[in-house]
Amino acid sequence: MAHVSIKDLVKIYPEKKGPGVKVVHGINLEIKDGEFMVLVGPSGCGKSTTLRMIAGLEEVSGGTIAIDDQVVNHVVPKDRDIAMVFQNYALYPHMTVFNNMAFGLKLRKFPKDEIDRRVREASSILGLDPYLDRKPKALSGGQRQRVAVGRAIVRHPKVFLFDEPLSNLDAKMRVSTRTDISKLHARLGATMIYVTHDQVEAMTMGDRICVMKDGRIMQVAEPLELYNQPANVFVAGFIGSPPMNFFHGSLERSGDQVVFVEKNTSAVPMHITLTPDLAKAGSRHLGKPVIFGVRPENIHDAATVADAAPGTTSEVTVEVSEPMGAETLLYLTTGAHSFIARVNPTDRFDPDQRVKVVFQVANAHLFDATTETRLNPT
Ligand SMILES: Nc1ncnc2c1ncn2[C@@H]1O[C@H](COP(=O)(O)OP(=O)(O)OP(=O)(O)O)[C@@H](O)[C@H]1O
Ligand SMILES: [Mg+2]
């Protein structure tokens, strides 16, 4: 087991002409011993590049990567004691499952009985015992994926790196393999760094999640902290499905209260009275543009709420209603902003119907419209 320490890490890919393209902009990240750290972010944000630098498959352009306090920038991959599982796990088609897992150890000249012991241990952890004599083509996608993980386990590495290992699997298999990898982490207690662009995978698997955008870290936090206290508009919109709703507008004083007034030129603007906490957080932004954020589960059909506080309701128009069974997703519009509410599945709505909704303001978020950072007290 090991901890990984990333300091001011930079990656510049060389260009034929010009100074090169900077795709990782001096990131800092500490991954603790035994931690499951997820790197998540949209395509092209530098997740794989970062992981490949940790593995030693990509040269570091600036900063340092240390494993257990030893800087490994110039250590070759095979001496870093790291095992990586890729999306395209390319098993050797002519070898059995056993030999696919044993191959790396054979190359490293491990004694035969040690290879045997390690492969059987990995196979039992991964539930691959019945398949050891099969060739990869006689396995399901999920089983092949487990063989690829087995190849990593037999090495007993200090750190496991995963780059989107589940993206070739169908939805159902992804969910079950996701659980298998989480169990594996619990069982081995190993340090794991896991790259995905899927925020559900990130939320369900990570001890902590590092959200990246354009080669920069937006926030590092535990899953629920990311969800409840996103540092900025990007994290707020990226984590959660359906995503958080955002309304542009400004803050105005009304008596001793602060009201969010929606920017809306096509209909009566929505007015939402802020809670005292939120009002205090926004006090320096009076008259300035802000973004008001509310998650779909914090917007309710007013007909189902007995005691909505004054100033927390708004009349809006239904665009689409999607019954999902356990809940109904209601696509609404104020005229200027479209947004989504999660409502009771027994309620029925028609397109163009007017409906009064209640905003649960205690769970709302306020962002500076210019810097996009969150203003709520922490
Ligand atoms: N060998 C390369 N040469 C030049 N640019 C590259 C190279 N590899 C990646 N890039 C660029 O670096 C940026 C980051 O790529 P990277 O593969 O790290 O993204 P990612 O976050 O893993 O995305 P995805 O989710 O699509 O896998 C992208 O803009 C990509 O085009
Ligand atoms: Mg990638």
Image (cartoon, rainbow, N blue to C red):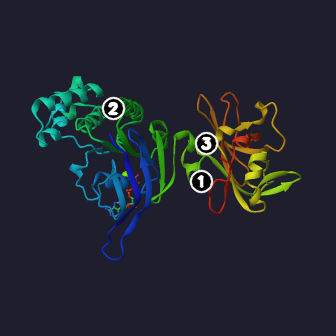
Q: Please report the residue visible at 30 percent of the width from the left and 74 percent of the height from the top.
A: 16
Residue at the image position 84 percent from the left and 41 percent from the top: 310
x then y, percent, for residue 174 = 39, 35
323 and 145: which is toward the camera: 145
Can residue 264 be spotted in the picture?
Answer: no
Marks 2 and 3, the one that precedes in the sequence? 2
Which mark, by number, is residue 54? Answer: none
- State the residue position of label 3: 228
Residue 215 in the image: x percent, y percent?
44, 59
| Residue at mark 2 | 188
Ligand 1 is found in the corner quadrant, namely bottom left
- Give the label, 1 or 2, closer to the camera: 2
Q: Amino acid at mark 2?
A: Leu
Cβ atoms under marks 1 and 3 closer than 8 Å: no
Q: Quadrant of residue 314?
A: top right
Task: Say what amino acid the circle numbered 3 marks.
Answer: Asn
112 horizontally vs 60: left or right: left
User: Hey, which residue is sitting farthest bottom in the picture?
Assistant: 17
* 99 left or right of 242 in image: left
Q: From this view, report whether residue 139 is shown above or below residue 223.
A: above
Q: Which mark is residue 232?
A: 1
- The location of residue 161, given as percent across then percent down, is 33, 45
Residue at 73% x, 50% y is 334
